[in-house]
Image: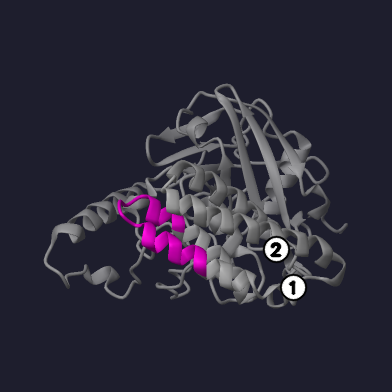
């Protein structure tokens, strides 16, 4: 069985954590030489939010609505932030007063439904403004979550086509031309994962194909470390990955990372080796429950069936200071079952994994 991470990288991550803590109490202006040029800021730690931002759309009004609703979560963590919440809601309301700017990016046949969603968002924002006056945190949280789910539907309705061509050399591998939702039943409870083919079509396609084959049913979680990672996908026997019964060969999956601002993913090379030290992936490691392709430490294109959930506490890994970003392929996020994932350890088992949405986006390999 190959390792998720070599000891050097593991120790480096711990060192980064210590540096991060030290930065919080050290003299202003000091940064470690190895990361002095890296961007600072608050990482987005919600997997659902990361998936929304990863959608290949370019409608600024709907992004403003999303950003305003996302920000309310930050304000609720602090005391006496009701003024900021009211401003967020006012900003969202002003955008919703101009629905034509939002509808401009929606396909014509989807516009009637989109109009209904916009009306529902407007009504929901008005209701939240009243809840803010009453300072009802719990109901604001519930309504914010509901409205962001509607924003997700609205943004998905803006995706017109798959945004790029996957290199022909990977046509022998399954590809996910969109998104899929996978329900994973474990011996300790249920998990829901959304995998993103818009950002990692080959990696996500491989995973969805294996789920469809029933590959993960009955497999154990083989490696775990508290607040770090939980790995599975190693089949019984001598094999460490998936052997295609049609070819009798190990299915190898390339490293695949889409960088913010790029039109298509980078394949077969880490961002570090490509000299892109400060570039940020569209799907970063900043969320508890990031779903990631495991691989042999010295083979960037050696992944197959093994994957891991990233469990690092995201509050301790600021944006731009995570050594895993660009070294491994993130291809989705846990969206439900965080409390279950936190309980799972090595020796626990996947009872079943099932694609419950998006299977139509799976493109099977072309015949040789």
Q: Residues within 10 Å of mark 2 (few under 14, many from 20)?
A: many
Q: Secondary structure at mark 1?
A: helix
Instruction: Give the camera-side residue of 180 and 147.
Output: 147
Q: What quarter of the picture does the C terminus occupy?
A: bottom right
Q: Real-space Cα distance between discs 2 and 1? A: 9 Å
Residue 65, image x and y in percent? 57, 66
Q: Residues within 10 Å of mark 1 (few under 14, many from 20)?
A: many
- Does 1 appear above or below 87? above
Q: Indicate which disc, 2 or 1, sits on the residue closer to the N terminus.
A: 1
Q: Which residue, as the protein is rendered here, is positioned at the far left?
A: 27
Residue 112 visible somewhere in the drawing: yes
Q: Secondary structure at mark 2?
A: helix
Residue in view at x 34 percent, y 46 percent: 7
Residue 85 is a magenta residue: yes
Residue 259: which numbered mark, if any?
A: none
Residue 3, image x and y in percent? 46, 42
Disc 2 vs disc 1: Cβ atoms closer than 8 Å? yes
Residue 16, image x and y in percent? 28, 56
Residue 45 visible somewhere in the drawing: no
Residue in view at x 51 percent, y 70 percent: 91
The residue wearing badge 2 is: 118
The magenta segment: 72-90
Residue 235, image x and y in percent? 63, 32
52 on left or right of 20: right
278 on left or right of 110: left
The residue wearing badge 1 is: 103
């Amino acid at each position: 069985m190959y390792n998720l991470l070599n000891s050097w990288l593991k120790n480096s991550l711990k060192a980064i954590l210590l540096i991060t803590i030290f930065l919080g109490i050290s003299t202003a202006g000091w940064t470690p030489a190895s990361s002095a040029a890296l961007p600072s800021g608050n990482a987005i730690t919600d997997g659902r939010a990361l998936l929304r931002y990863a959608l290949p759309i370019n409608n600024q009004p709907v992004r403003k609505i999303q950003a305003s609703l996302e920000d309310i979560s930050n304000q609720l963590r602090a005391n006496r932030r009701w003024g900021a919440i009211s401003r967020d809601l006012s900003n969202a309301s002003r955008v919703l007063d101009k629905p034509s700017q939002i509808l401009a990016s929606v396909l014509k046949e989807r516009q009637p439904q989109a109009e209904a969603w916009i009306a529902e968002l407007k009504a929901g924002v008005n209701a939240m403004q009243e809840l803010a006056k009453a300072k009802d945190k719990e109901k604001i949280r519930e309504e914010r979550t509901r409205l962001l789910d509607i924003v997700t539907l609205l943004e998905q309705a803006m995706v017109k086509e798959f945004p790029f061509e996957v290199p022909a050399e990977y046509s022998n591998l399954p590809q996910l031309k969109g998104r899929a939702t996978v329900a994973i039943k474990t011996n300790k409870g249920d998990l829901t994962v959304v995998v993103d083919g818009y950002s990692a079509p080959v990696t996500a396609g491989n995973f969805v194909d294996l789920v469809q084959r029933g590959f993960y049913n009955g497999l154990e979680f083989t490696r775990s470390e508290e607040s770090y990672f939980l790995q599975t996908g190693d089949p019984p026997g001598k094999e460490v990955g998936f052997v295609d019964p049609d070819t009798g060969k190990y299915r190898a999956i390339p490293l695949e990372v889409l960088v913010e601002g790029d039109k298509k993913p980078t394949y077969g090379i880490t961002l570090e080796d490509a000299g892109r030290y400060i570039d940020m992936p569209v799907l970063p490691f900043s969320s508890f429950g990031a779903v990631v392709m495991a691989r042999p430490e010295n083979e960037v294109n050696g992944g197959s069936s093994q994957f891991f959930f990233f469990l690092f506490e995201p509050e301790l890994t600021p944006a731009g200071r995570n050594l895993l970003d660009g070294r491994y392929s993130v291809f989705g996020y846990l969206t439900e079952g965080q409390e279950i994932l936190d309980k799972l350890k090595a020796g626990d088992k996947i009872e079943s994994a099932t694609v419950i949405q998006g299977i139509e986006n799976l493109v099977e390999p072309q015949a040789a």
